[in-house]
Image: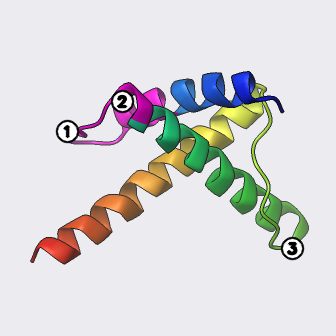
Amino acid sequence: MNILAWIVLGLIAGAIAKAIYPGYQSGSILGTMVLGIVGAFVGGTLYEFLTTGTLTLTAASFSFGGLLVAVLGAVIALFLYYAIIRRSVY
């Protein structure tokens, strides 16, 4: 997938994940894009593991199913990020 498709998928998936995740999430448009790209990797790897049983680092494709997997991965990434941040504050 070319870099422009990664940017568009990252923006869309990151924005949807931030809208779904409860509470306020700070961050710029660049942070949203990075969140979506990380979510595409997390979701793609999780999907690959659940369907084939192998743990390989893959990313979601630029399709409707890929967008859903990327959003799911971005929500998981948000959850893990805030769990780590909250634990380090206390």
Amino acid on which disc 3 is placed: Thr
The quarter of the image holding the N terminus is top right
Q: Secondary structure at mark 3?
A: loop
Q: Secondary structure at mark 1?
A: loop
In the image, which residues are magenta?
Answer: 14-30
Q: Is residue 25 left or right of residue 34?
A: left
Report x, y in % for residue 54: 87, 73
Q: CA–CA distance between discs 3 and 1?
A: 35 Å
Is 38 colored magenta in this rendering?
Answer: no
Q: Is residue 13 above or below residue 90?
A: above
Quadrant in the picture for residue 88? bottom left
Q: Which mark is residue 19?
A: 2
Q: CA–CA distance between discs 3 and 2?
A: 31 Å
Q: Is residue 14 left or right of residue 28?
A: right
Q: Which mark is residue 24?
A: 1
Report x, y in % for residue 37: 60, 42
Amino acid on which disc 2 is placed: Ala
Amino acid on which disc 1 is placed: Tyr
Mark nearer the N terminus (3 vs 1):
1
The quarter of the image holding the C terminus is bottom left
The colour scheme used to paint the residues is rainbow
User: Label 3 belongs to which residue?
Assistant: 54
